[in-house]
Amino acid sequence: MTSARLFTRTSLSLILGASLTACAVGPTYQRPVINTPNELKQLPVAQAVQALPKKLKQVDIDWLHWWRTFNDPVLDQLLEEAAYSNQDIQLAAARVEEAQAQSVYTNLSRYPGIDANVGASRAKISETTGRAAPGIRTTNNNFLASLAINYEIDFWGKYSRANEAARARLLAQQANLGTVKASLYASVAQSYFALRAFDAQHELAQSTLQTRLEHRRLQEKRFQAGVIGEQDWQQTLSEVASAEIQRAQARQNQQLAETALAILLGRSPAAIAKPEIARGKNLQGLFDQVALPAELPAEILTRRPDLVAAEQSLIAANADIGQAKAQYFPSIKLTSGSGYESRNLADLIQPSSMLWNLGANLAQPVFRGGLISSLINGAKARKNQALAQYVQSVQFAFRDVHDALVNVAANEEIVTAAQTRQQALKETLRLVNLRYTNGYSSYLEVLNAQRDLFQVESTLIDTQRAQLAATVSLYKALGGGWAGQQLK
């Protein structure tokens, strides 16, 4: 067996043996126990949202899939545009790439480092100092080619804890990207629904204005004929102006909603200044596509990316404590080298020119003036912060689901009542117009009936928009909707 092979085997044996005997100091992560409800009660939908399971899991979710249930190609196109151009997603994706690079770097730091050294030098010593022996060569060449291995034994788990923390932070950033996507798509959809609601309000105001203009034409003839008095005529003019105000306000809301949506879509400043937003289904068509789940499985909340990110941050903070505690213990480093050295280049690669070395170094901290203990205390404090944030995230998750379900249930009742009132007021207006034409009712009764009908129709539009918004909020609260294929 040659010296080089003996050196290699000896080095690897030392490294492998040291690795096998390594252990990790610091606390082992245990998920905190949180008192969560068994279910959300007294709600008409999702009666089976139970406590969080024992383990949160990160799953791949098609964040754009759920929106296809609205059957609106324009909405799908807008969401895809936002996914491609929005800067929040670009920022979150870059953070994931950074965390991934850091995780790879931390993991590779656990392994031996091998450096190649190749050198050539020429030196001359002084002949007049008296230090050189008579007849010695005063000018010499030196050639070197070698490999050096450096390895710190991770006996106390310093590097393994660092790798554990880096991996957890990577998973947290990946989950944060999911949070950004869910929030962005929800904001785009809600802005789109708001725009379609303002479109509906504009159409209602325009229709009301046309009705008032037609009524003004008839009232003008009656006023000129002396059938009605000055009060009725001025009231007619007032109602026309009121309808014009309502139309102008609806148009203003349309334009502001278009600008807000253009920003979410990541469009250029020029496109934001003059936004052109395509329209698909009208508000009623979108509202008719809302299909709420009859029940929700308990594990659905485990997909919430903010909960996954919060727990991964807690895992990372827990690993940081072990990494800090490892500073108390000695560091053991192994070094070795092998190569060739000769004063003549022609003799460099010869067995007689071979050199090698093996070395070990142990460094034990003796006095650091409380430096290490302060590092540990800081790591523990960061873990307490991460724990508080995790508990808070769980609280917010149940609150979000609860509030979304409450809003959904309330809006369902409001829409039903508004539709009933709308039909009743339509019939009331028909009867009042008939009575006014025959002289049995005053013009004020007609105006009141018109105002009431307009108000309930406007309220119905707002409630439909609110129901769509509540449905989107439930999508966010449940971590990406409730489509069956996403729950597998």
Image (cartoon, rainbow, N blue to C red):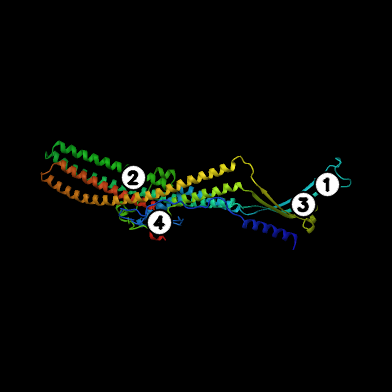
| Disc number for residue 139 | 1
Residue furthest out toward the bottom: 1
Local secondary structure at mark 3: strand
Q: Position of residue 168 (x, y in %)?
A: 51, 52
| Disc number for residue 143 | 3
The mark that comes first in sequence, 2 or 4, is 2
Local secondary structure at mark 4: helix
Report crowding for label 4: few under 14, some 14 to 19, many 20 or more residues within 10 A (C-alpha).
many
Q: Position of residue 326 (x, y in %)?
A: 59, 48
- Left or right of 139 in this view: 149: left
User: Badges 4 and 1: C-beta atoms under 8 Å apart?
Assistant: no
The mark that comes first in sequence, 3 or 4, is 3
Residue type marked 3: Phe
Residue on which the image places disc 2: 254
Vertical arrangement, residue 487 with respect to residue 232, above or below? below
Find the distance from the CA under tag 1 to the CA under tag 2: 89 Å
Q: Residue at x 75, y 62 (%)?
A: 2
The answer to whether residue 133 shows anywhere in this view is yes
The mark that comes first in sequence, 1 or 2, is 1
Residue on which the image places disc 4: 300
Q: Residue at x 16, y 42 (%)?
A: 445
* Circle 2 or circle 4, nearest the eye: 4
Q: Residue at x 48, y 45 (%)?
A: 384
The mark that comes first in sequence, 2 or 3, is 3
Residue furthest out toward the left: 439
- Left or right of 183 in this view: 364: right
* Circle 3 or circle 4, nearest the eye: 4
